[in-house]
Image (spheres, grey):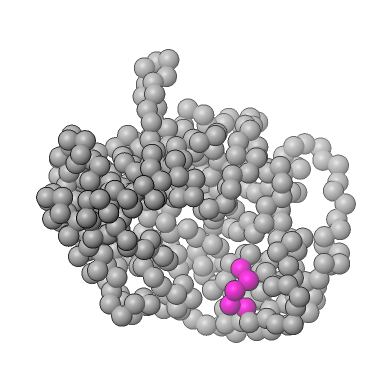
């Protein structure tokens, strides 16, 4: 089988290419150049150059063809502009999820297929398995990586059956230490290379510095909300339906300046996200203050003291129907139906017991335990055991 590997210059994709070669496949390496502007990175050199050189050395070591493809214009259009737009609106985007949906398993995949590839492989810690239903239809299952500390299935949560049918994740059965050991044994230049940090398309970068390229600083107030604020002591009413209850539980608490006390200033609400504590410059508290709400029209940040501050928590969230994506289309809920699942609202979060509900009004996830820092724009993903079933953008 001819397989194109997205060789990133890291150890994971390097070992993925080696394993496929060992399995007897015809392997071709493609490096995606995603970013041209070195002015916002924290390194002296543009990181893609170093990564490209490392990828080339791995390809030479393995004796496989290597090619660089420039996708920077596509990244700017599909990922960077989306990020700026979302932050401007006061939402919290996840560019890595979009990168996989819009670039790696869309344009990159199509490029690989045009080169005669049968499949595309990446260095993600995830797995794909295939079964057939009673009609003989092939169903592809997106499973968590065996290494629970590195599982990256969440980043693949927007892929569809067609994309999964062409995807391979060769290191999904391995742990990170095992991957590094294979790289050492093979003498690959990436064996001891640190995992990449920061944004998927740029490298090591200060997010506020990056956002300041297009989002101008704008001074605003930081308002502290106190735990005795009356908004926390609403009596939970009797609900005429489950939908009414979910609408109540998923509703965000909103604040006004008069609800608290101005304790500082910031340089732009669009540089921050719900649940953030770093970068606020607030002192004089026993515990750190966390952002519980952002009022974008007035450019106001509302904070509460302590990671257990009541305003940080909600037990349900809503996803608009047009943002609901099922990896397993055969399991899609009809209006009025529900399903017990496990769910997470961010990468690295442990899976939480939950129930998903589908209504004409929208799609809801209700958690057994209230969740901290649910932010608009994040992706919520739901699982059945190890299998990722679907995902959606939090409203």
Of residues 189 and 307, the one drawn nearer to the viewer in this rendering = 189
Classify residue 375 as left or right of residue 201: right
- Which residue is at 58% across, 77% downward? 279
Classify residue 141 as left or right of residue 60: right
- The quarter of the picture where residue 220 lies is bottom right
> Residue 240: in sight, yes or no?
yes
Of residues 55 and 211, the one drawn nearer to the viewer in this rendering = 55
Q: Which residues are magenta?
A: 276-280
Residue 373 in magenta?
A: no
Image location of residue 183, percent across then percent down: 27, 52
- The quarter of the picture where residue 362 lies is top right
Image location of residue 245, percent across then percent down: 76, 43
Residue 279 in magenta?
A: yes
Q: Residue furthest front?
A: 185
> Residue 30: in sight, yes or no?
no
Classify residue 226 as left or right of residue 163: right
- Which residue is at 48% across, 76% downward? 208
């Amino acid at each position: 089988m001819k397989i194109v590997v997205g060789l990133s210059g890291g150890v994971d994709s390097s070992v993925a290419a080696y394993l496929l070669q060992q399995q007897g496949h015809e392997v071709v390496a493609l490096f995606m150049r995603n970013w041209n502007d070195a002015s916002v990175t924290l390194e002296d050199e543009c990181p893609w150059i170093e990564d490209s050189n490392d990828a080339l050395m791995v390809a030479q070591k393995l004796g496989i063809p290597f090619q660089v493809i420039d996708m920077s214009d596509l990244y700017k259009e599909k990922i960077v502009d989306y990020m700026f737009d979302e932050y401007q609106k006061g939402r919290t985007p996840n560019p890595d999820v979009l990168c996989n949906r819009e670039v790696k398993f869309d344009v990159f995949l199509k490029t690989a297929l045009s080169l005669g590839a049968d499949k595309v492989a990446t260095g993600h810690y995830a797995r794909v398995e295939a079964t057939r239903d009673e009609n003989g239809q092939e169903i592809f299952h997106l499973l968590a990586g065996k290494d629970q500390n590195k599982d990256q299935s969440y980043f693949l949560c927007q892929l569809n059956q067609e994309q999964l049918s062409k995807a391979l994740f060769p290191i999904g059965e391995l742990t990170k230490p095992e991957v590094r050991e294979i790289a050492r044994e093979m003498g690959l230049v990436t064996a001891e290379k640190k995992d990449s940090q920061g944004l998927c398309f740029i490298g090591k970068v200060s997010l506020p510095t990056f956002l300041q390229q297009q989002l101008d600083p704008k001074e605003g107030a930081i308002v502290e909300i106190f735990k005795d604020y009356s908004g926390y002591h609403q009596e939970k009413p009797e609900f005429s339906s489950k939908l009414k209850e979910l609408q109540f539980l998923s509703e965000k608490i909103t604040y006004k300046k008069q609800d608290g006390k101005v304790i500082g200033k910031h340089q732009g609400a669009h540089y921050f996200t719900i649940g953030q504590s770093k970068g606020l410059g607030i002192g004089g508290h026993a515990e750190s203050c966390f952002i519980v709400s952002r009022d974008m029209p007035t450019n106001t940040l509302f904070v509460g003291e302590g990671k257990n501050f009541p305003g940080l928590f909600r037990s349900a969230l809503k996803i608009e129907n047009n943002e609901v994506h099922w990896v397993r289309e055969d399991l899609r809920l009809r209006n009025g139906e529900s399903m017990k699942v496990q769910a997470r609202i961010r990468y690295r979060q442990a899976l939480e017991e939950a129930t998903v509900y589908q209504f004409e009004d929208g799609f809801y996830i209700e958690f057994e335990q209230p969740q901290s820092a649910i932010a608009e724009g994040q992706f919520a993903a739901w699982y059945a055991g190890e299998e990722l079933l679907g995902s959606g953008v939090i409203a």
